[in-house]
């Protein structure tokens, strides 16, 4: 069943929010899995669907022809990580290496973004390999 969502946009971002669920966020524990896109229409569809289907409480994408989508959840919510990563896998949102392995994408805390941690200055505590075998795409530990 689709969840109610609010869509808000500005010059930089388009947000999709389930306000009732997003109100429960603890800002010190919120972070995101990211998908870098080259098709804004696709980005809009996957962000809206993720919130409407209850995968995440909030998602956003750059308000540009290409950019980044962010799918928000709590750092310590293992079930939310599993829902989000499953969504990424089902929708082809994780690129693969030439050898066919999944890229070991990172979960990034909003505090890291606010602190200006980007590029070489960004170190993630949580990566895809914490959840999924990058070679097979199978879940680690069930």
Image: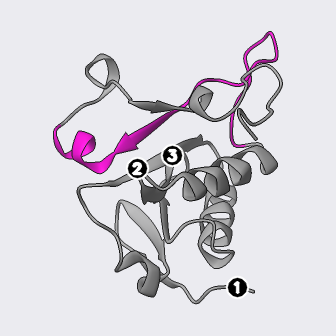
Where does the image place residue 9, in percent across and percent down from the top left?
41, 74
- C-alpha gap between disc 3 and disc 1: 21 Å
Residue for point 48% across, 56% down: 77
Hey, which residue is sitting farthest top in the picture? 99
The answer to whether residue 127 is left or right of residue 40 is left
Q: Do the residues bearing badges 2 and 1 touch, measured as CB atoms within 8 Å? A: no
Q: Which residues are magenta?
A: 93-115
Q: Is residue 62 visible?
A: no
Mark 1 Cα-neighbour bin, 10 Å: few <14, some 14–19, many ≥20: few
The residue that disc 1 covers is: 2
Hey, which residue is sitting farthest front in the picture? 141
Main SS type for the magenta part?
A: loop
Mark closer to the chain start, 2 or 3: 3
The answer to whether residue 108 is left or right of residue 141 is left
- C-alpha gap between disc 2 and disc 3: 10 Å
Where does the image place residue 64, in percent across and percent down from the top left?
48, 54
- C-alpha gap between disc 2 and disc 1: 24 Å
Q: Do the residues bearing badges 3 and 1 touch, measured as CB atoms within 8 Å? A: no
Mark closer to the chain start, 3 or 1: 1
The residue that disc 3 covers is: 33
């Amino acid at each position: 069943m689709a969840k109610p969502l609010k869509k808000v946009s500005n010059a930089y971002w388009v947000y999709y929010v389930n306000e009732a669920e997003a109100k429960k966020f603890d800002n010190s524990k919120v972070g995101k899995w990211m998908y870098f896109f080259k098709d804004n229409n696709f980005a809009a569809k996957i962000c809206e669907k993720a919130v409407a289907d209850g995968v995440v409480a909030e998602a956003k994408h750059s308000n540009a022809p290409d950019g980044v989508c962010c799918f928000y959840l709590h750092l310590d919510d293992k079930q939310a990580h599993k829902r989000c990563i499953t969504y990424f896998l089902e929708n082809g949102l994780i690129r693969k290496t030439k050898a066919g392995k999944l890229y070991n994408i990172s979960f990034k805390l909003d505090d890291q973004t606010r602190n200006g941690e980007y590029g070489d200055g960004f170190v993630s505590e949580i990566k895809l390999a914490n959840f999924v075998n990058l070679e097979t795409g199978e879940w680690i530990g069930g």
